[in-house]
Image: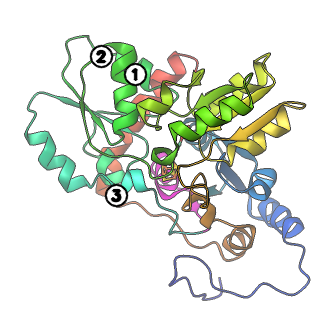
Amino acid sequence: MIAVDISRGYVCAPIEEGVDMIAEIKRMKKEKNAVILAHYYQESAIQDIADFVGDSLALAQWAAKCDADILVVCGVHFMGETAKILCPNKKVLIPDMNAGCSLADSCKAEDLAAFKTQYPGYKVISYVNTSAAVKAHTDIVVTSTNARQIVESFPADEKLIFGPDRNLGNYINSITGRNMVLWNGACHVHEKFSVEKIVELKKQYPNAQVLAHPECKSTVLALADKVGSTAALLKYAINSDCKEFIVATESGILHEMQKNGKGKTFIPAPPADSTCACNECNYMRLNTIEKLYNTLKYELPEITVDSQIAEKAIAPIEKMLEISAQLGL
Ligand code: 13P
Ligand code: SF4
């Protein structure tokens, strides 16, 4: 492989003039036995060229069973790490290493380790939006698709710590009647949805239903007709008889909603400051078709996970996948 500059976290190489990047990506995928996994928050062009588009649970499930030599994870870093932990012998690439996650960043492994010492005898449930190092301090991982069922799989009197998302944790406490100790983290995109703006929109679209991701604040969730993961919101929108939806999650999901919900109207819920594009995750949007093209071409940048961390982090991820399979999720 030619030496190439990735000092900025992505391949810095000029793209040949006139090249058909979409055709080339398809060709390289075949030639290299590579697959592209994309999260629903990726830009539309990436979703359209991906072999698989899904929520964070589905991406982990797909990575675990896939027999390609190269996985290109078009999502954020923790998704790439999860894929690498599940497939240590495969090459796992991400178009831009800087694609992080404000929620994952809100919980550092050493801080969680110190937090745990304040709660002896507690089990730790970590949202998948965490680093591999945090997962290594965890008893079981959850995603927004299976959090409720996994929490309920513990005896009612089990003492639990849930992190890092306080909004998801609060929501799960409220629907399960548990009293989990919550880590005080949040996602900068989902925290910005405004109750006032959604109420205004509801006046404009009185028949619209509100769909909200559980990372939103409880005041936004209180307005929702459906609370769920990206996959759950998508499924609900497609199957519902309702024709109009106000969508309180990252606006990338609208692409799949519009593709599958023909004739329905999907309105992105506005953030408090309507002058910004704050309902777009700036981390997710760091991945572009150009970077994806160069990633496949140079097979860089590659996700790596320290082997000692990976050894500890795999058990709570596999436990989650096992329970999800038993539940048919
Ligand atoms: P999902 O588990 O619904 O895909 O959500 C992932 C995420 O990052 C939400 O912000
Ligand atoms: Fe992380 Fe929020 Fe972006 Fe999801 S939307 S990847 S939780 S920063």
Q: Nearer the viewer, residue 186 or 51?
A: 186
Q: Is mark 1 within 8 Å of ligand 1?
A: no
Count residues near mark 2 (Cα–Cα under 10 Å), then give few for <14, some for 14-19, many for 20+. few
Q: Which residue position is annotated with label 2?
A: 154
Residue 105 highlighted magenta (yes or no) = no
Count residues near mark 1 (Cα–Cα under 10 Å), then give few for <14, some for 14-19, many for 20+. some
Task: Give the image location of residue 325, x and y in percent.
Answer: 54, 22
Residue 81 highlighted magenta (yes or no) = yes
- Numbered tag placed on residue 150 in the rendering: 1
Q: Amino acid at mark 2?
A: Phe
Q: Are marks 1 and 2 in contact (CB under 8 Å)?
A: yes
Q: Nearer the viewer, residue 189 or 319?
A: 189
Q: Nearer the viewer, residue 118 or 150?
A: 118
Which quadrant: the N terminus? Answer: bottom right
Which quadrant: the C terminus? Answer: top right
Q: Amino acid at mark 3?
A: Ser
Q: Which residue appears at 73% of the width and 42% of the height?
A: 254
